[in-house]
Image (cartoon, grey):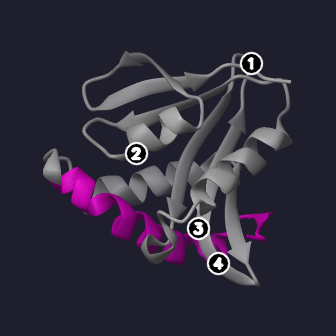
Amino acid sequence: MTFVFRPATRADFESLLDLSVRVMRPHLERVGRWDPARRRARMEAAFAGGGLHVIEQAGRPIGCIGLEPGAEAVELHSLYLEPDLQGQGLGAAIVAQALALHPGRRFAIEVLKDSPARRFWERQGFVLMGEQPFDWVMARPPTD
């Protein structure tokens, strides 16, 4: 299960937006939050932060992940993986590599409520810290 992270460029925008739509749309529709303009704006914001990475396997883009180091925690966002690659352990390996890039740091993520992703994040060591109207706020304590 070999993959690499590389910084996302503007040339990646449309393909990563498409991936985020394919991954998130069913979940957002289920909670009444699907809005194509909002999805585009959220991906624009992910790009603007500068911490978005394309995940490549054998030279092929298979997903993306956002890592924004802050004072309190590394904000993890925009982890989208091609649907046909989900459920095979690749997501856990990607998170492990992301954690290794920032050793000893706390990580935080917002997870859409009622999404099966919450169980995934709990398996990665994240715990529920709070909630917002549409998201769970989760964090993973620092480890050595």
Residue receiving disc 2: 117
- Dot 3 and dot 4 residues touching (CB under 8 Å): yes
Label 3 or label 1, whichever comes before in sequence order: 3
Return the residue nearer the eye: 14 or 111. Answer: 111
Q: Secondary structure at mark 1?
A: loop
Characterize the local packing of mark 1: few (<14), some (14-19) or many (20 or more) Cα atoms within 10 angstroms.
few
| Quadrant of the image containing the C terminus | top right
Report the amino acid beneath label 2: Ala
> In the rendered view, would you say 60 is above or below 94?
below
> In the rendered view, would you say 10 is above or below 46?
below
Residue receiving disc 1: 71
The label number, if any, that marks residue 63 in the structure image:
3
Q: Is residue 74 visible?
A: yes
Q: Which secondary structure dominates the residues rendered in magenta?
A: helix
Residue receiving disc 4: 61
The image quadrant that residue 117 belongs to is top left
The image quadrant that residue 108 belongs to is top right
Q: Which residues are magenta?
A: 1-29
Q: Secondary structure at mark 3?
A: strand
Characterize the local packing of mark 4: few (<14), some (14-19) or many (20 or more) Cα atoms within 10 angstroms.
some
Report the amino acid beneath label 1: Ala
Report the amino acid beneath label 4: Pro
